[in-house]
Image: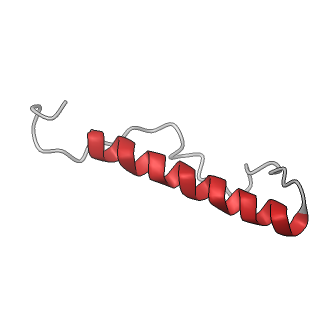
């Protein structure tokens, strides 16, 4: 669990850095509606690839 939280934090930091770079180049960036490219069938699904019940 700690690994996944650390990984998610790193992803957020990368997104922030990318946004800062885009704003330097193009001004304020406001994302539009992403529904047409989002894989909505997976956006609210929790997947468990663990063996057995011990990892829950």
- Tell which of 8 and 44 is nearer to you: 8
For image coordinates 85% across by 69% down, the residue present is: 25
- Please indicate whether residue 10 sits to the left or right of residue 49 in the image: right
For image coordinates 12% across by 44% down, the residue present is: 51
Asked where in the image residue 18 lies, by quadrant, the reply is: bottom right
Q: What is the x, y in percent for residue 23?
A: 82, 60
Q: Residue furthest right?
A: 27
- Tell which of 49 and 22 is nearer to you: 22
- Please indicate whether residue 24 sits to the left or right of residue 35 in the image: right
- Please indicate whether residue 23 sits to the left or right of residue 35 in the image: right
Q: State the quadrant of the C terminus.
A: top left
Count the labels in the image: 0
- Tell which of 22 and 53 is nearer to you: 22
| Coloring applied to the structure | secondary structure
Q: What is the x, y in percent for residue 33?
A: 80, 48
Q: State the quadrant of the N terminus.
A: top left
For image coordinates 11% across by 32% down, the residue present is: 53
């Amino acid at each position: 669990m700690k690994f996944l939280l650390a990984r998610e934090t790193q992803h957020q930091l990368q997104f922030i850095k990318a946004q800062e770079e885009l704003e330097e180049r193009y001004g304020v960036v406001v994302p539009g509606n992403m529904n047409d490219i989002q894989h909505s069938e997976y956006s609210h699904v929790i997947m468990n690839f663990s063996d057995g019940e011990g990892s829950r």
